[in-house]
Image (cartoon, rainbow, N blue to C red):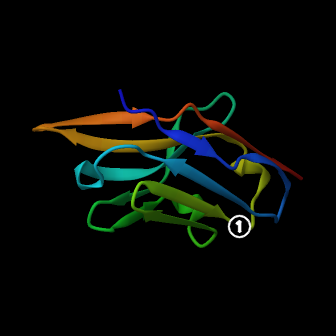
Amino acid sequence: QVQLAESGGGLVQAGGSLRLSCVVPGNIFRFNVMGWYRQAPGKQRELVATITRGGTTNYVDSVKGRFTLSRDKNMVYLQMNSLKPEDTGVYYCYAQIMSGPVADDYWGQGTQVTVSS
């Protein structure tokens, strides 16, 4: 069982910044996709940003220009700038990892991000 470990959430005022980190254990050559999702109270979990093995990034429109996703070997980071109250939620690290011919999805336990107005 692959366990993703997140860190870096917290409370910040609007306009502030936070950096989320996640450790994805295992063979990096088996990582198809890495990234972050979030879930706001009363809402469904949504994609925030992902990066493929080839380095292609994808961001939800609401964070473009403010958030930056990066990775380094087994680490994936989300730099969040110009935070807004609507960015509040639980942020989950995500990884899709190949096990032979099968692609499995893995999630972290989540880290709370709260942006006050």
Q: Is residue 56 above or below residue 2?
A: below
Q: Position of residue 28 (x, y in %)?
A: 30, 54
Rendered residue at 28%/60% (across/down): 53
Helix, strand or loop at disc 1? loop
- Judging depth in this view, the residue of 16 and 99 nearest the camera is 99
Query: Is residue 82 toward the left or the right of residue 1 in the image?
Result: right
Q: Residues within 10 Å of mark 1 (few under 14, many from 20)?
A: some
- Judging depth in this view, the residue of 30 and 112 nearest the camera is 30
Instruction: State the residue lying farthest toward the bottom.
Output: 65
Which image quarter is the N terminus in? top left
Q: Is residue 57 above or below residue 40?
A: below
Q: Position of residue 101 (x, y in %)?
A: 10, 38
Q: Mark 1 = which residue? A: 81
Q: Position of residue 58 (x, y in %)?
A: 41, 62
Q: Position of residue 24 (x, y in %)?
A: 43, 46
Rendered residue at 63%/53% (across/down): 20
Instruction: State the residue lying farthest toward the front.
Output: 26
Q: Quadrant of residue 95?
A: top left
Query: Is residue 34 toward the left or the right of residue 70 in the image?
Result: left
Rendered residue at 47%/56% (across/down): 75
Q: Amino acid at mark 1?
A: Asn
- Judging depth in this view, the residue of 1 and 80 nearest the camera is 1
